Amino acid sequence: MTTILVTGGTGTLGRLVTERLRADGHEVRVLSRHTPPYAVDLRTGGTGLDAALAGVRTVVHCASTPRGGDEQAARNLVEAARRAGVGHLVYISIVGVDRVPLGYYRAKFAVERLIEESGLGWTVLRATQFHDLLLTLFESLAKSPVMAVPAGVGDQPVEVAEVAERLVELALAAPAGRVPDLAGPEVRALDSLARAWLRATGRRRPVVRVPLFGRTYRAFRAGGHLAPDRAEGKVTFEDHLARRFGDRD
């Protein structure tokens, strides 16, 4: 069986990728900042990264953070992967990184280009936002007596387990370059999703649509982060809410 390294292997997505690969009998190494024996901060690299990659054929790069450092982390990973003779680097990106001028999206797009130009065999999958991200967003917005959501913005959330399944398929196949996007089953207005979350959690808040300004907001309103033609996900937001909080209907 192939030895596979999963960066960010303790995160929301990486943990599921790791579990599925191990269930299939593959040897999997988990690389994260705080998990031995491969506790490595990709932003600084170091000898621990070379040790983690020794004998690895495939890397699934799930480690990422909106707090910055993704580009340097990718540079360190690519350089170490070259030294180790890694044959396949699989990267999870986000739909719209080339259309939405958000700082985090720009960093993800830059990482895509680094990987494409790395000289390694590579595969890049873009996915829409995970359901879990909306739960985190709405939890934060509900701290106020009124839930204010950006007016005119939709979302197309996808189940993280479905993304993990696709990444496993790609990791076990030959390098494929940029593959078709993976998006959730439906495009929904943010205020509709917020009301669904309120019902599922038994909370009461008025939901107000607030117009915003700027290039990033315009790009989101234009649907730059959506992929309605790639709505292959099966789990709806209500399905996810029912699994997480129970069915209140």
Image (spheres, rainbow, N blue to C red):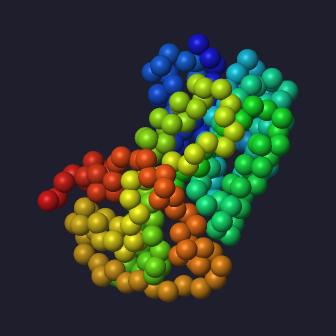
Q: Farthest residue to the front: give it.
A: 229
Residue located 70% across and 22% down the image: 57
Q: Is 57 on the left-hand or right-hand side of 118?
A: left
Confirm whether residue 104 shows in the render.
no
Residue at 83% in and 43% down: 117
- Residue 113 position in % (x across, y down): 77, 49
Residue sitting at x 85%, y 27%: 83
Is 60 drawn above or below residue 248 in the view shown? above
User: Which residue is more in the foreground, 68 or 25?
Assistant: 25
Residue drawn at (81%, 23%) of the image: 85
Q: Position of residue 107 (x, y in %)?
A: 72, 58
* Quadrant of the frame with the N terminus: top right
Q: Position of residue 232 (x, y in %)?
A: 43, 47
| 86 versus 224 height, above or below | above
The quadrant where residue 224 appears: bottom right
Residue 155 location (% of width, % of height): 45, 65
